Image (cartoon, rainbow, N blue to C red):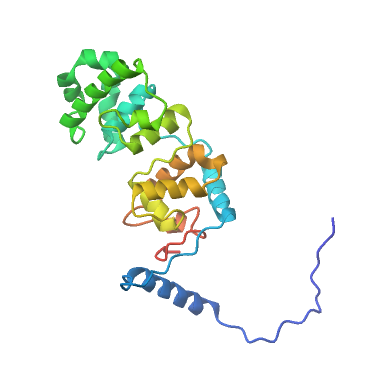
C-alpha cells in the first residue's frame, strides 16, 4: 500500500488566519435567531439543509452499533396482548401500562379469555391507567370484533387493524412492526419531536413525519428505526432539556438550538 507522507518543505499559504470560534459562535447565534423569529407573512422560513443519504446512513449505523436489537418497552405475550397494551398506552406511560397488564394478561391473553373476564373486571385491572373506563370498553369491543371478523387473530394489514375500536394508525404501525416485522414507522410524541428537531423528516402532523421518515431511512434500518427514534427521544433528545452533549448524532443534527 502506498504510504502517504507530508512534505516538510511545503509552504503554508500566506492567507491571514481567521479566528474560528467567534465565526462559529456568530453563525450559531444567527441560526438561533432565525429559528426563533416567526416567518414574515408571504415569506418562506429558512429551512435547514436536508440530510444527505450518507449522513442518514451514518446516523442509523451509530444507533445500530449502540443498540443492535432495540426492544419496545410495552410488555406483551403475543400479538393480541401487544395490541391491547398499545391501545391502553394512549396518553399513558409504558411503565404505568405494564403495571396493569402484568396481572391482566396473566388471566386474559386471548380475545376469548378477555370476553369471559368481562368489561367490569377489565376495568378493575386497568383502573390505574388514564381514561381506563373508555379503554376497558374498547378492549372488550376489539376482542369481540377479532373473534367475529378475524378468527380471533390480530389481522396483518393496517387498514384492518384500524377498524378495531381504540386502534388508530399509530397502533397499527406498532403492531405490524413488533408483532409481524413489517417496516412501518409509528410516530408518537418522541418520534415526532426527533423527526422535526433533527431535520430528518420535518412535518406538521404525525403522518407527514411518518411518510418523511419512511422516505429517507434506508430499508436495512427500517425494522428497528421506530424503536431507535423512540428511545432516542425518550432518553436523549428530551422535550425540555435535550442531552445534546451525549447525543450520538449531535454533529449531524440540524436543530439550531442544539447545545453542542
Ligand atoms: S443534538 Fe440535541 S437536539 Fe439534536 S438530536 Fe441530539 S439531543 Fe436532539
Question: Which residue occupies 26% across, 21% down?
Answer: 104
**Figure label count:** 0
Q: Position of residue 162 (x, y in %)?
A: 32, 32
Q: Position of residue 81 (x, y in %)?
A: 33, 23
In the rendered view, does 100 fall on the left or right side of 155? left
Which image quarter holds the N terminus? bottom right
Instruction: Pick whichever, 123 or 164, lies toward us.
Output: 164
Q: Position of residue 212 (x, y in %)?
A: 45, 50
Instruction: Pick whichever, 209 or 190, lies toward us.
Output: 209
Which image quarter holds the C terminus? bottom left
Note whether 253 is above or below 180 in the view shown: below
Q: Give the quadrant of residue 77.
A: top left
In the rendered view, does 61 fall on the left or right side of 191? right
Note whether 129 is above or below 198 in the view shown: above
In the rendered view, does 5 fall on the left or right side of 175? right
Question: Which residue occupies 41% across, 56% down?
Answer: 202
Question: Which residue occupies 41% across, 44% down?
Answer: 231
Asked whether the viewer can see residue 73, the reply is no
Name the quarter showing ligand 1.
bottom left
In the rendered view, does 67 fall on the left or right side of 111? right
Q: Position of residue 12 (x, y in %)?
A: 72, 81
Asked whether the viewer can see residue 85, the reply is yes
Amino acid at each position: 500500500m502506498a504510504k502517504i507522507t507530508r512534505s516538510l518543505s511545503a509552504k503554508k499559504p500566506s492567507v491571514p488566519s481567521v479566528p474560528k470560534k467567534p465565526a462559529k459562535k456568530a453563525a450559531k447565534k444567527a441560526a438561533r435567531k432565525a429559528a426563533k423569529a416567526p416567518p414574515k407573512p408571504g415569506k418562506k422560513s429558512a429551512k435547514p439543509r436536508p440530510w444527505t443519504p450518507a449522513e442518514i446512513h451514518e446516523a442509523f449505523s451509530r444507533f445500530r452499533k449502540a443498540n443492535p436489537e432495540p426492544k419496545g418497552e410495552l410488555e406483551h405475550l403475543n400479538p393480541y396482548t401487544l395490541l391491547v397494551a398499545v391501545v391502553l398506552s394512549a396518553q399513558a406511560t409504558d411503565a404505568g401500562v405494564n403495571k396493569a397488564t402484568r396481572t391482566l394478561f396473566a388471566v386474559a391473553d386471548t380475545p376469548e379469555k378477555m370476553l369471559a373476564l368481562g368489561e367490569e373486571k377489565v376495568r378493575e385491572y386497568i383502573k390505574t391507567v388514564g381514561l381506563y373506563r373508555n379503554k376497558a370498553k374498547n378492549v372488550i369491543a376489539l376482542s369481540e370484533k377479532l373473534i367475529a371478523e378475524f378468527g380471533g387473530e390480530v389481522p396483518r394489514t393496517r387498514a384492518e387493524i384500524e377498524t378495531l375500536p381504540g386502534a388508530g394508525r399509530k397502533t397499527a404501525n406498532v403492531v405490524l412492526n413488533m408483532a409481524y416485522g413489517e417496516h412501518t414507522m409509528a410516530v408518537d410524541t418522541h418520534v415526532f419531536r426527533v423527526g422535526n428537531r433533527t431535520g430528518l423528516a420535518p412535518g406538521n402532523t404525525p403522518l407527514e413525519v411518518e411518510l418523511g421518515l419512511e422516505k429517507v431511512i434506508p430499508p436495512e434500518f427500517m425494522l428497528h428505526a421506530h424503536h431507535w427514534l423512540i428511545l432516542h427521544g425518550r432518553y436523549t433528545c428530551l422535550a425540555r432539556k435535550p442531552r445534546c452533549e451525549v447525543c450520538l448524532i449531535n454533529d449531524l443534527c440540524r436543530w439550531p438550538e442544539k447545545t453542542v
